[in-house]
């Protein structure tokens, strides 16, 4: 498995996906080796090097064998960084295969690892399975790709889809993008959604929950929570625009928007400009434990994305039994059923978002009923063990087809 992110280096949905999938595959009896770059400064980065004669690797407590290579400096842009880092990823894969390690297939996650994925595929004649987590044209939401970087990333995505024996898409929405943007035949695509880890509601004491609430405004305020990368496509600027309207009816509401990204300073400035900075917390990166604790104490979780291939954050909130309000876009509309497991609102529409949040706060009993239904559905359909079983079915198909090919 080739992935740009793996714990502790997890910044977005792709890293979360691989972090959940790999251990679940191991539990199901699959031997999984993950090759990943490791930025300097993170735990394990000091060991992020591979001996061409003895790749070694780290066996995690989940049973996943992980090989970490140094993340190259950013260079001129992320594309150049990916190209340079891929050489180290490729060297690691070569060391494994050249020293007798046997694999049934290569599973690559997104364009950032396409350079080494296709090289190892052809050198060792191993089938390549690719998961597409997002697309550059999708992020542009229909606008032309104008910059050289956008065009190069789109080309790398096309290359990954072309080289892949089969393609996994995380939603029907993403499958349609893969078909439309890369001319991929529908019969080449399998839809396997993201999953979530089980949520333990009894892990916190009442004092711990009170402390969590106190960190974000005190006991007298109810919390509207959002988490994700602070980038334009996540729509957090819409949520801040909604704050004054919500405060007009519920003045004791605190908005918590957690995550890191290029729009952090803009969102801070926006809240100040609207005069609601005291009601908006931007804590930056938070741990999974802190995130789950916030889901437990929040009155509502809001995800107003402009572009969302799947929406694992909504699944995480639903697994925690937190009422959700999401934009009716991309994969989110496949995760949340309006009026049944949450509320969906019009994308890029502040007034619609205000309606969704206010409806949730005005009707706590109805919101709780939707949240309970969502929690039950997530537990049945989106556990990582269920997702691993669906992924293994794709693996088996690839391995079966490979045996019939004289390569």
Image (tube, rainbow, N blue to C red):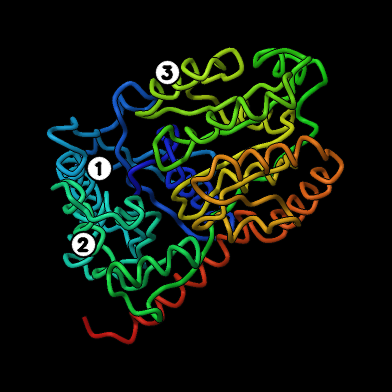
Which comes sooner in the sequence, label 1 or label 3?
1
Distance CA(mark 1)–CA(mark 3): 51 Å
Residue at the image position 37 percent from the left and 59 percent from the top: 132
Distance CA(mark 3)–CA(mark 2): 44 Å
Mark in the foreground, 3 or 2: 3
In this rendering, position of residue 200 left or right of residue 71? right
Mark 3, secondary structure of its residue: helix
Mark 1, secondary structure of its residue: loop
Q: Which residue is mark 2?
A: 118
- Above or below, 402 relative to 317: below
Mark in the foreground, 1 or 3: 3
Quadrant in the picture for the N terminus? bottom left
Mark 2, secondary structure of its residue: helix
- 25 or 157, nearer to the observer: 157
Residue at the image position 21 percent from the left and 39 percent from the top: 78
Q: Which residue is mark 3?
A: 269
Q: Which residue is mark 1?
A: 54
Quadrant in the picture for the C terminus? bottom left
Mark in the foreground, 1 or 2: 2
Residue 59 lies in quadrant: top left
Mark 3, other Cα within 10 Å: few <14 / some 14–19 / many ≥20 = few
Q: Mark 1 near mark 2, Cβ–Cβ under 8 Å? A: no
């Amino acid at each position: 498995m080739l992935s740009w992110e793996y714990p502790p280096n997890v910044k977005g949905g792709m890293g979360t996906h691989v972090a959940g999938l790999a251990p679940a595959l191991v539990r199901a009896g699959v031997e999984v080796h993950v090759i990943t770059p490791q930025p300097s400064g993170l735990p394990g980065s000091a060991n992020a090097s591979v001996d061409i004669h003895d790749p070694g690797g780290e066996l995690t407590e989940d049973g996943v064998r992980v090989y970490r290579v140094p993340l190259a400096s950013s260079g001129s842009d992320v594309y150049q960084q990916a190209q340079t880092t891929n050489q180290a990823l490729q060297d690691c894969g070569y060391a494994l295969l050249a020293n007798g390690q046997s694999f049934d297939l290569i599973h690559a996650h997104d364009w950032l690892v396409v350079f080494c994925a296709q090289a190892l595929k052809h050198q060792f004649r191993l089938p390549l399975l690719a998961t597409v987590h997002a697309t550059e044209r999708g992020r542009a939401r229909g606008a032309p790709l104008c910059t050289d970087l956008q065009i190069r990333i789109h080309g790398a995505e096309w290359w990954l889809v072309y080289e892949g024996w089969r393609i996994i898409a995380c939603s029907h929405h993403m499958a349609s993008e893969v078909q439309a943007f890369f001319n991929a035949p529908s019969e080449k695509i399998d839809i396997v959604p993201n999953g979530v880890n089980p949520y333990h509601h009894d892990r916190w004491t009442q004092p711990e929950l009170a402390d969590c609430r106190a960190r974000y405004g005190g006991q007298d305020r109810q919390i509207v929570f959002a988490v994700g990368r602070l980038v334009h496509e996540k729509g957090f600027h819409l949520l801040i625009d909604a704050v004054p309207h919500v405060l007009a009816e519920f003045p004791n509401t605190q908005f918590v928007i957690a995550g890191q990204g290029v729009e952090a300073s803009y969102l801070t400035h926006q809240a100040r400009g609207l005069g609601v900075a005291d009601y908006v917390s931007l804590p930056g990166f938070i741990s999974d434990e802190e995130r789950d604790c916030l889901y437990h104490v929040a009155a509502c979780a809001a995800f107003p994305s402009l572009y969302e291939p799947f929406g694992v954050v909504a699944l995480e909130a639903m697994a925690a039994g937190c009422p959700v309000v999401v934009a009716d876009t991309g994969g989110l509309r496949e995760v949340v059923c309006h009026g049944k497991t949450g509320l969906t609102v019009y994308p890029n529409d502040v007034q619609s978002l205000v309606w969704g949040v206010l409806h949730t706060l005005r009707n706590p009993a109805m919101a709780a009923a939707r949240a309970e239904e969502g929690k039950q559905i997530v537990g049945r359909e989106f556990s990582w063990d269920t997702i691993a079983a669906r992924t293994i079915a794709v693996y088996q198909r690839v391995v079966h087809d490979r045996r019939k090919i004289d390569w």
